[in-house]
Amino acid sequence: MLPGLPPAGREGRARSVGVRRTRADQRRKRREQPDDPLGAGRDRRRRRPIGRSTNGDGARLRVRGHRGHRGYRGYRGVRGRGCSPTAPARERGFRGDRFQPVRVGADSRLSRRSHPPGGSERGLIPPEHRPGRVPFGCRFGRGVSMTHATDKHPVPPMPVSVGARIRAVRKARGWMQHGLAQRAGLSVSTISKVESGHLAASPLVTAACARALRVSVTDLTGQPYMDALKADELEILVQPLRQAIANPLLPGEDIEPREPASIRADIARLDATRLRGEYMAIGAEAPALIDELLVVVDRLPEGREREAAYRLLADAYRLARSFVGKLGFTDLSLLALDRMQQTIPHSGDPYLHTAVVYYRSEYFLHHGFPEIALREIGRVEGTLDEPVRRGDPQAASVRGALYLKSAVLHSRTRKPGAAGEVAARIGEARELADRLPGPDAYGLIFDSTNVELHAASTQLDLGEVGRMVEMGERIRMPAGWVRNREGHHHMDMGRAYELVGRRGDALAALERARRTAPAQTRYHPTTRETVHALLRARGTPSAELRGYARWIGV
């Protein structure tokens, strides 16, 4: 047997094990010595995690193990050099075979450069100047970028995607992912994919999570997007409109109104701009129109002229609702609907209440309460049966729009048999659309083209993404058709293309939506979620995608 080698056989193995045990006992005893204030070093053989403790003054201290260990917890150190093995031993807190805290002397180089005046008398780093908590993951000498209390941006940035906001609110509630999934009626994998960014948050998922977390949908979508509003100079139009909507139908004293015919022409012009997807003019002119009409209805005597003026006032509130709703001020849009409902007893219009129910269902749909909207629609549908049988075009238009809205609401309920309810409502709407001579009088956009668009979009909410793509690609828009509804269809197609993996087609669909209705596309949460999903896909984003993301503010 050569000198220096352990003997072979059972005796040699036993002696080798005994040596290892002896060395382990020696290391354990060294850790338990009084001069080690932490007692939390790392056993190199057993790879125990590094601990933290405090000294006698209660100051938090950190210790470091050696960089070759699996699960090595990095430490930025006093000078911020990370876990580099080239850093001085005193800065790394590693001295020989002993793991000790980093101390800064009053006259040391570390104290002169990084220890601010007024620190501890014992030379320890005061709490307000210590680095933050160091996470796991710094292995084999790699440093982790940490945020120091004196950095330029001490506060972490706010999350920008719906999934990140859901995760932030969930953690603030102290819930696990399975707890949120159980409360929202979703699968754990859906919650995980949405929070991690691997799946774009659909309106259904967003509303379900908002309802479970007991927050508003706008808290998760980030609406209103104030940065984009300021860039487009739209935020200066919101406050006058807010004041006009909040006014409880009280006429002004220093306003001299125009003739009702001139006001009617302005409202018709603004309604045409709404159908083209242009909303700047509505925000600029609607407050003055509301103030004028309040004076008009106050001065006119009872009669048909006064009823016609009240109908114009209802149209003005409807335009105001569309403007603030598109920008994300959903509560303000609901208040505008309440003002619109106040004009119903004086307007002499038998179907205006039904139109208000239609618009209010959009609020419940957006905030994840489709059951309430379905109950309200069910109550007013019976009042339209007789006028529809008589052939009243306004009643048929409102009834068809309610069929389409009911189809969308049923697709969001996620109940068994929802697909059958959707198909039944779409079929009834097709029959009515074929009999209508022209457009409706309430801006509901009910015709054959809109029926086919709803038939395709409801498939997306039902989870039939491939069928939605097939149906959507077969639709051809008539010349001069409603541009805001066409733009919404292109946004839905972009979302569907992204879900099936056709990312190039998704970006092309979003570009078409931008050309068709730019303001609506820019401020819609579906656009932002689709762009987030495209940016998180594999590969480097294209220049076109990056430019589109900058345009919407992502």
Image: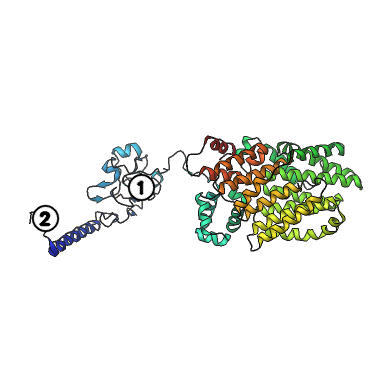
- Residue type at mark 2? Leu
Q: Quadrant of the C terminus?
A: top right
Report whether 11 appears left or right of 392. Answer: left
Estimate how packed mark 1 is, as few (under 14), some (14 to 19) or many (20 or more) residues with alpha carbons within 10 Å.
Answer: many
Q: Position of residue 401 (x, y in %)?
A: 76, 52
- Residue type at mark 1? Cys
Q: CA distance from mark 1 to mark 2?
A: 38 Å
Query: Can residue 255 be seen in the rendering of this structure?
Result: no
Report whether 240 appears left or right of 292. Answer: left
Residue at the image position 87 percent from the left and 45 percent from the top:
308
Residue at the image position 26 percent from the left and 47 percent from the top:
94
Residue underneath mark 2:
5
Q: Position of residue 433 (x, y in %)?
A: 78, 50
Q: Is residue 466 above or below residue 531?
A: below
Relative depth, front residue between 91 and 402: 402
For label 1, the SS is loop
Q: Position of residue 31 (x, y in %)?
A: 25, 56
Res 324 → quadrant: top right
Q: Position of residue 34 (x, y in %)?
A: 24, 56
Estimate how packed mark 2 is, as few (under 14), some (14 to 19) or many (20 or more) residues with alpha carbons within 10 Å.
Answer: few
Residue underneath mark 1:
138
Residue at the image position 64 percent from the left and 53 percent from the top:
459
Report whether 245 appears left or right of 103. Answer: right
Query: Can residue 239 be seen in the rendering of this structure?
Result: yes
